[in-house]
């Protein structure tokens, strides 16, 4: 399964959202931290076991926006 992940640099931190999972959004001070938080939230939202690996793959950068793919 592959889900889109959009991260936006807001200057004072980073917003992350998975558009295909309504309400699955997070904020953090660093890009790495927001990826960790949103991945954990996606795991919870989808009821995935901790043993299930989730890989992040940077697809493209577009200004202040980063487009990733979450790969399960």
Image (tube, rainbow, N blue to C red):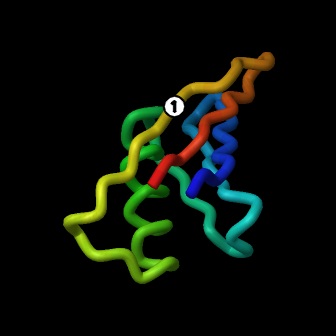
Quadrant of the rendering where the C terminus is positioned: bottom left
Using the image, determine if residue 17 lies above or below residue 28. Answer: below
Would you say 50 lies left or right of 27 here? left
Would you say 38 lies left or right of 69 here? left
Within 10 Å of the Cα at label 1, are there few (<14), some (14-19), or many (20+) other Cα atoms?
Answer: few
Using the image, determine if residue 10 lies above or below residue 41. Answer: above
Where residue 41 appears, as percent x and y from the top left, is 45, 68
Using the image, determine if residue 60 lies above or below residue 28. Answer: above
Query: SS at mark 1?
Result: strand
Q: Is residue 34 visible?
A: yes
Where residue 25 appears, as percent x and y from the top left, is 62, 62
Residue beneath the point at 38% across and 63% down: 40
Where residue 24 appears, as percent x and y from the top left, is 62, 68
Please tell me in which quadrant of the rendered image residue 58 appears: top right
Quadrant of the rendering where the N terminus is positioned: bottom right
Please tell me in which quadrant of the rendered image residue 62 appears: top right
Q: Which residue is mark 1?
A: 57
Q: Is residue 10 visible?
A: no
Residue beneath the point at 54% across and 52% down: 27
Would you say 31 lies left or right of 69 here? left
Using the image, determine if residue 17 lies above or below residue 61. Answer: below
Residue beneath the point at 51% across and 31% down: 57
Residue that sits furthest to the left in the current view: 51
Where residue 8 appears, as percent x and y from the top left, is 69, 36
């Amino acid at each position: 399964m592959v889900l889109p992940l959009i991260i936006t640099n807001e200057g004072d931190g980073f917003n992350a959202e998975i558009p295909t999972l309504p309400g699955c959004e997070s904020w953090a001070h660093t890009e790495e931290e927001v990826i960790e938080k949103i991945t954990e939230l996606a795991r919870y939202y989808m009821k995935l076991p901790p043993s299930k690996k989730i890989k992040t793959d940077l697809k493209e950068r577009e200004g202040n926006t980063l487009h990733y793919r979450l790969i399960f």
